[in-house]
Image (cartoon, helix red, strand yellow):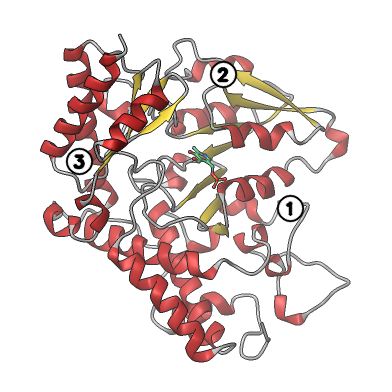
Amino acid sequence: MGSAGLRSTNDYHNKSRAIGIPDARIETSLGDPDWTALRAEFPLLDRCTYLNACSLGPLPRAGREALARYAADWDREGTPVWYSTWLPLLGRLRDRLGQLLGTPADSVALAPSVSVALTTLASCIPRDAAAGRLKVLIGELDFPTLGHQWLSRGELDVEWVPSPDGISVPPAAFEERLGPGVAVMATTHLLYTTGYLQDVRALAELAHRAGAFLLVDGYQTVGCVPLQVQELDVDFYVGGCLKWLSGGPGTAFAYVRPDLIDKLEPRGTGWFASADPFSFSLQTLEFAPDARRFETGTWPVPSHYAALAALELILDRVGVDAICRRLRGFTTRILDRCEEAGVRTLTPREPEERCGVVALECDRPEEVEAALLAQKIVVDSRPGRIRLSPHWCLTQEEVDQATDCVLTEIKKGR
Ligand SMILES: Cc1ncc(COP(=O)(O)O)c(C=O)c1O
């Protein structure tokens, strides 16, 4: 990539603004969406009953068109496409992620996966060798990549915070373990195996009272639970567009609390994290003043085309608050049907403690998943359970019918 036309740190943002893209806007309610019209955006939903949106969101028509446009733009222009199209598109993506999270775009760094975002953030903490051995608290039900980040860093001790019921980790269990040696409390917003939605605001308060950072993995929350990360008062919030946001792989992100950004320096970086990449300075390193300092090298641009198209669809035509309401309705009904059928679930009954994921106890999860796939019902299996996460464009009838098929398959082995 050449350097013509883009010289200073903020040019990405400036270029975006120059073409009329506003800063992060707080998402507002769009009213009740037309679910039938929206469903036409997702052709896959007419070929199967899709109950696995928390793993891989279906491709929207707009995403398919964006991927075709990516190839056409590249082929049309070659190098100049960076300045005419690709960098402005990155600016729009940053703004939309800021809008999704309720924070200015320059507090959000792009990453190709949540694992990469976590690796960079983990490398920033702690830098002070004189601080002695520090500890990280991690919930016992968190996603493996969250634990692996800290286990791979020998200078830190990891303590697992237990779950008494296998469904949630009570804030009190974190609180008991907080103390002077704890640098970070890291946990997930919505637990991937149970669908439990943690009270992140309460966890932030506990962590901060004890002088620790709170890092939250929001991968299962972004796109299905309305978010204002600054109000949640978290220090770090990571997520990505693959799941509820239907943006495909390759677009993840890390929010860093604005007042922390210039105090953190990653160990391991890339030229696009520097203050002025196009100065081509080799022998000095000055990090970007904004969250771009947590990025690395050239971005996976095709992924960003697809992710932006899906974000625009969700933010402009649907609204995360509407998705949340609809999913809570679906999951309430799934839980009711499971109870009637005598199948145990590992998901809370209180609507505000869950959103779009229900886990059903099952001793043959892979067999049940395969049997359902043969009936064109897409679900997910995890050890000891079947996980249902209906797409928000399904109809209530489809969810009911598919749930009955899931229950029949689970009960067959009894
Ligand atoms: C809660 C959670 N965190 C992290 C990940 C992994 O993200 P990545 O593959 O982008 O590193 C997943 C993937 O399923 C997840 O569910």
Q: Single out the mark in the foreground, 3 or 2.
A: 3
First in sequence: mark 2 vs mark 1: 2
Q: Are marks 3 and 2 in contact (CB under 8 Å)?
A: no
Alpha-carbon neighbours of circle 1 within 10 Å: few (<14), some, or many (≥20)? many
Q: Crowding near pointer 2: few (<14 within 10 Å), some, many (20+)?
A: some
Nearer to the camera, 308 or 66 = 66
Q: Which image quarter: residue 372?
A: top left
Q: Amino acid at mark 3?
A: Arg
Q: Is residue 49 left or right of residue 58?
A: left
Q: Residues within 10 Å of mark 3 (few under 14, many from 20)?
A: many
- Amino acid carrying label 1: it is Pro
Q: Disc 2 and disc 1: Cα gap in Å?
A: 28 Å
281 relative position to 207: left or right: right
Up-down relation of residue 122 to residue 34 (above or below): above
Q: Residue at x 27, y 54 (%)?
A: 44
Label 2 residue SS: helix
Q: Helix or strand or loop: what does disc 1 sit on?
A: loop
Q: Position of residue 391 (x, y in %)?
A: 27, 44
Q: Which residue is mark 3?
A: 326
Of circles 3 and 1, the one toward us is 3
What residue lies at 44% left-to-right and 69% top-to-bottom? 305
Sequence-first tag of 3 and 1: 1
Residue that mark 1 sits on: 266
Whole-angstrom CA distance, mark 3 to mark 1, is 40 Å
